[in-house]
Amino acid sequence: MKRFRCVVKAAALCWLALAADARAQASSDAALFLLLPVGARAASLGTAMVAQRGNGDAMWWNPAGLAAVTGRETSLNHSQSLMGTGDALSLVSRTRVGAFGIGANLLQNDGGELTGEDTLSSGNLYRRSIALVGSYGVTLGGHLHVGAAWKYVQVRFDCSGECPPNPTVLFSTAAFDLGGQFTGRLWNVPVVVGVALRNVGTGLTPEEDGADPARLHVGASAQYKIPDRLTQDAVVSGTLDLVMGRADDRPLPRVGAELAWADGVFLRGGYIVEAMDSESGGASLGIGFRVRRRLQVDFSRNFSGLSADAGQPPVQLALRVTF
């Protein structure tokens, strides 16, 4: 626990140093796609993921969670909302020196139709937001797990049909995530405490009066096996995150719960406390199925936020294969 407190203090010092410099940096909304949920399980748990571990979702939320990966897996996540169509692909592999992961996240928005001066030639404009990720997680001393992720981020306009000769790149830059987790037991209940510093990079804020995607997450999760006299092979778990941005005056909570039966059927629910104009705030529900312990399918849906208010509630679908 002492080591974990050191990790938390180090993350807090980094956060304070970055926050002190934030006012001097310019900002933009362009990189806010990094805050959209990646993974149907994460979305259905209200994105309370900082203390979650053991699969490739960790590379998008807290790379320290990769330390619990025991084999290899690949996953494909698809999302649809008012913000656009998102697709994320990840590959994670366990080695003797820890777990490594690579991934790519693409969000595409239809920017509209372009018409030439003669009104006969036209093209379709697309805005593409891209993040390429490399991550690593390792266990130190049995109970302490740490991880880091590096991201290449690009936001650009592309066009199909009759278009300008070259695409327009709004900006490209690098960012990083740092995370830590401590595992233990409380009253004989498995508990995980996590902290993560996400989307940190000076190039993510190129214009004035915009928003910053950097976030500090602190949270915990607990798991409880329901006694066999009540039901067979059922486990319930809960998770809580506190999330704070540089411009926030207080941390905002996110909560999630999951009921797993026979390690093959999963029912999930979550809630995000966010500003009223947030895309992802509010309640979410999800369900998952695991087939022969190798293939898992997850689905989630949000019930509030900008997309839901516009009549297009965000949905997420994920396929995961372990081998």
Image (tube, rainbow, N blue to C red):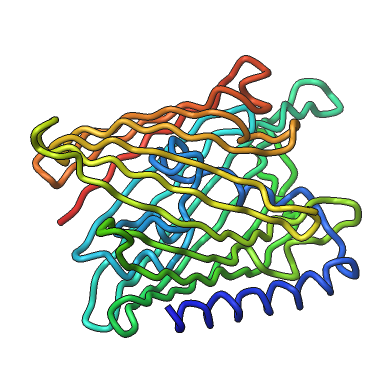
Pinpoint residue 266: horizontal percent, then vertical percent.
Answer: 26, 34
Pinpoint residue 207: horizontal percent, then vertical percent.
Answer: 87, 57
Q: Residue 208 appears in which quarter of the rendering?
A: bottom right
Quadrant occupied by the C terminus: bottom left
Q: Is residue 90 at all visible to an observer of this figure?
A: no
Q: Residue 297 appears in which quarter of the rendering?
A: top left
- Toward the viewer: 281 or 226? 226
Horizontally, is 276 left or right of 34 in the view? Answer: right
Judged from this view, the residue extending furthest toward the front is 187
Pinpoint residue 139: horizontal percent, then vertical percent.
Answer: 32, 78
Horizontally, is 254 left or right of 157 in the view? Answer: left
- Toward the viewer: 16 or 235? 235
- Toward the viewer: 2 or 318? 2
Horizontally, is 2 left or right of 237 in the view? Answer: right
Q: Residue at x 39, y 44 (%)?
A: 238
Pinpoint residue 113: horizontal percent, then vertical percent.
Answer: 73, 26
Quadrant occupied by the N terminus: bottom left
Q: Residue 265 appears in which quarter of the rendering?
A: top left
Q: Residue at x 39, y 64 (%)?
A: 102
Q: Is residue 139 at all visible to an observer of this figure?
A: yes
Vertical placement of 3 versus 276: above or below?
Answer: below
Vertical placement of 26 versus 85: above or below?
Answer: below
Q: Residue at x 46, y 72 (%)?
A: 180
